[in-house]
Image (cartoon, helix red, strand yellow):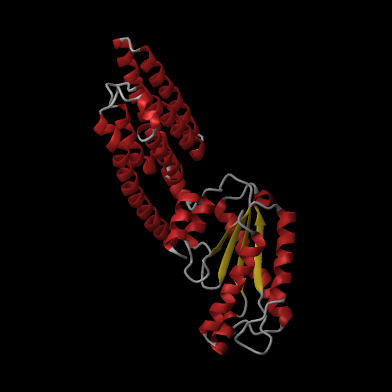
Amino acid sequence: MTKWDVVREIIFEDLQTDSDRELQLRTLLLGTIFLALISAILTAMNIAKGWWIMTGSTGLLVAGFLVAALCASRKKALASAVITAVMVAVTFSYYALSGQNEGFACLWILLVPVIGPSLLGIRVAFFLSMYFQLFLIALFSTPLSQMVADHYTATFLARFPVLYFAAFGGMGVLAVQKQYYLNKTVDQAYRDGLTRLYNRIYYTEALEKRTEDDFSLAVFDLNRLKYVNDTFGHLAGDEMICAAAGLLRDTFGPDSVVARIGGDEFAVISPADSAQMADLLARLTQKARSWKGSFSECECLLALSVGCVARDEFSTYSLEEVLKEADRRMYEDKAAWYRSSGFDRRR
């Protein structure tokens, strides 16, 4: 992956984990409430001075930021960020065009690249900052500058777009670097290094968040991994583990949490009901039968023992009891597989 691919992913793709989203929601909620409070103070000051046009604009900001805060409180981070960005874009554009606030209103625009990434997220802040860069170039460096010539000095007209570009570029680089290293840190904390599935930490957190939800839990154990490691080496065992991980990922898809929770143990948290899980497990078994490892000419089966529990089956059970039931069913399935296959379970 090139450096430009990394930048593109950070700006245009949602790479956030649940903890990142929670942090952004809290930042948005506090930030929009703070901005609404500041706008309310400005509104009161404008009323006192009789600046009715400014009063209307700051009053609009109060209403917009309160709506954005309401969206953040309801876990709608993108809607909150977009509403905030629109309020800032409309109001600051008006200030810059009208020369309100003694001709220095567009200095407020410099705050956008500074606090935008932290408050709005990199994606929304990038587009908002780009809008203001184009807006300033069009307003100050084209014939449109005649509209505001009386409000700003010639030096200000010539240099402010360059000043904004420097702030936009510098803060943009810092924001992308910060997000890149945050993504790497979170990835290392929540991903299994071998299979790239989620690890036990992420699985446990995801499970705890679903205590009141309907879901299906399936725990898997890879059969005969010790035999493969002892006979063909640990690289062969890693190949089998990665193959099992790939089958689970392809079968259950992005709507499920697929995790490696131990050496040869996997778990899936799925929104599917009992009937759907039965179909998915049958499909998984069919795919596993066609697998062929590269480490041996002889046939080496890829078999996963599974214990599956749908939350609605045991609505009165605690989460711990659901986990115990899934484990119990998995060990029953494992014992049955070894009995039917004739393999030595100790190998």
How many numbered dots are placed on residues in this image?
0
Q: What residue appears at the point 34 percent right and 48 percent down from the top-left corner? A: 169
Q: Is residue 174 above or below residue 189?
A: above
Residue 274 placement (x, y as % from top left): 72, 54
- Which corner quadrant holds the C terminus? bottom right
In which image quadrant can residue 132 be found?
Answer: top left
Q: Is residue 52 above or below residue 21?
A: above
Residue 167 placement (x, y as % from top left): 30, 43
In the image, 158 versus 271, the foreground residue is 158
In the image, 330 versus 156, the foreground residue is 156
Q: What residue appears at the point 36 percent right and 35 percent down from the top-left corner? A: 141
Q: What residue appears at the point 64 percent right and 64 percent down from the top-left corner? A: 250
In the image, 19 versus 82, the foreground residue is 82
- For residue 82, say whether it is visible: yes
Q: Is residue 86 above or below residue 282?
A: above
Q: Is residue 71 left or right of residue 247?
A: left
Residue 263 placement (x, y as % from top left): 51, 73
